């Protein structure tokens, strides 16, 4: 049994595969912010190509008189891939029991593919027919600002906007790299951590979201944002030479927003 | 009611594995119910009561089948073996041995939980950072 990932063709041991899979899983689990906030459907497999939108388009003309036609509208899945290479001597050391195998190239690929997923979900990807949560939201115009001490006000405004739109909580706050760092290192007057204050405002979690610009407050009630996975994140084998083995991280997915008003972007 | 379907600490299990375990538990319950109804029907002398139970066991057949199909969709290796065994005439044990041998040979370097080669990450809702 072999599939398109061609894992059995890689000149590496079972133990090496375990090491690579574990490392990728660890790195991705931290950075895949979108999956912590949106509904996830699947995985439906590599051969799954499109998401049913339940919508139709008119077909201008029919092949003959006496018939009419409608065409189903679907959202095609996008395949995303990040290549990486691991030194064969490092892989041999891994088999010898080395605990510090150099997997930097895999780590970089994992981060890149996580950022791509986060950006597609939160900010869209027009070339792949993905509309993001932030761009779809009708609640535009709130600024986070540069001073972390000022974050509670726009975050509270965002929660209030959601409540006014009839969007129930709990909510979560996705924070871009810089914004997350500022929040974590800031204590308000009296030493109360800003992180805790913001958690109380959103009645939910703050999530580090690499790839997100600014921040986004999202309702976690479910049913609003739909991520459909074809092949879930997997490592495949590409090729090798005497020195390195080349692999790739890959997945296929679609994303669409069912309730645009269920999130509020906060610009940096 | 506890969390008996988990053999490992639930907080250490990925969501997809927890869902798989729940459906395995459900499959077991449906099979038990089928066994119970078979026994009750075997001893029931009231035809009206027997009719009600025949209707009920039909529900259990349906639930069992749906649970099984869900699990097979999530486990390609299990599905492959099941395809070699189910709905065939002939020697059941022979079919089983053959199906297992075919599925268990070359695994494509795939050591993933569901046989797809995936890292099995799935949904991370409930995970925070």
Image (cartoon, grey):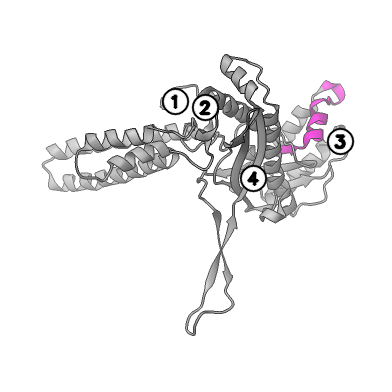
First in sequence, mark 3 or 4: give its number: 4
Q: Is residue B99 visible?
A: yes
Q: Locate residue B83 relative to residue B42 in the image: left or right.
A: right
Which residue has dot 2 on it?
B13
For marks 2 and 1, give the CA distance.
9 Å
For marks 3 and 4, give the CA distance.
37 Å
Structural crowding at the residue carrying mark 1, measured as other residues with C-alpha within 10 Å and reported as few (<14), some (14–19) or many (≥20): some
Which residue has dot 1 on it?
B6
3 and 4 marks on the same chain = yes
- Is A242 inside the magenta-drawn segment? no
Residue at x-position 68% and y-position 35%? A109
Instruction: Name which quarter of the figure residue B72 lies in.
Output: top left
For marks 1 and 3, give the CA distance.
45 Å
Instruction: Name which quarter of the figure residue A36 lies in.
Output: top right
Structural crowding at the residue carrying mark 2, measured as other residues with C-alpha within 10 Å and reported as few (<14), some (14–19) or many (≥20): few
1 and 3 marks on the same chain = no
Query: Chain ID for label 2?
Result: B
Which residue has dot 3 on it?
A150
| Nearest the eye: A242 or A38 | A242
């Amino acid at each position: 049994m072999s599939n398109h990932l061609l894992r059995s063709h890689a000149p590496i041991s079972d133990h090496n595969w375990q090491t690579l899979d574990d490392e990728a899983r660890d790195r991705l689990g931290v950075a895949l912010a979108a999956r912590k906030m949106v509904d996830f459907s699947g995985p439906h497999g590599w051969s799954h190509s499109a998401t049913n939108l339940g919508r139709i388009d008119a077909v201008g003309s029919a092949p003959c008189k006496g018939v009419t036609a409608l065409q189903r509208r679907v959202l095609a899945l996008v395949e995303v891939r990040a290549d990486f290479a691991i030194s064969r001597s490092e892989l041999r050391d891994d088999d010898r029991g080395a605990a510090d195998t150099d997997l930097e190239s895999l780590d970089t690929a994992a981060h890149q593919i996580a950022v791509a997923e986060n950006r597609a979900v939160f900010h869209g990807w027009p070339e792949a027919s993905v509309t993001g949560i932030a761009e779809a939201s009708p609640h535009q115009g709130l600024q986070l600002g540069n001073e972390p001490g000022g974050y509670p006000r726009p975050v509270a405004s965002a929660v209030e906007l959601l409540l006014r739109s009839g969007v129930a909580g709990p909510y979560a706050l996705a924070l871009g790299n810089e914004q997350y760092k500022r929040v974590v290192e800031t204590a308000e007057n009296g030493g109360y951590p800003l992180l805790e204050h913001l958690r109380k405002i959103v009645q939910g979690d703050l999530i580090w979201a690499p790839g997100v610009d600014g921040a986004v407050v999202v309702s976690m009630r479910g049913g609003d944002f739909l991520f459909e996975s074809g092949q879930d994140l997997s490592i495949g084998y590409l090729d090798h030479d005497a020195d390195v083995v080349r692999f790739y991280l890959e997945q296929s997915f679609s994303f669409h927003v069912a309730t645009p008003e269920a999130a509020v972007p906060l610009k940096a | 009611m506890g969390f008996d379907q988990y053999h490992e600490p639930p907080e250490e299990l990925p969501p997809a594995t927890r869902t798989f375990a729940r459906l395995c538990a459900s499959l077991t319950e449906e099979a038990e119910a089928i066994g119970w109804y078979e026994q009750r029907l075997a001893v029931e002398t009231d035809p009206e009561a027997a009719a009600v139970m025949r209707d009920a066991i039909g529900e259990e057949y349906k639930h069992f089948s749906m649970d099984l199909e869900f699990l097979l969709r999530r486990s390609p290796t299990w599905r492959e073996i099941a395809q070699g065994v189910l709905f065939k005439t002939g020697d059941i044990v022979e079919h089983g041995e053959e199906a297992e041998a075919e599925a268990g040979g070359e695994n494509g370097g795939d050591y993933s939980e569901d046989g797809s080669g995936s890292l099995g990450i799935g949904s991370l809702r409930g995970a925070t950072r």
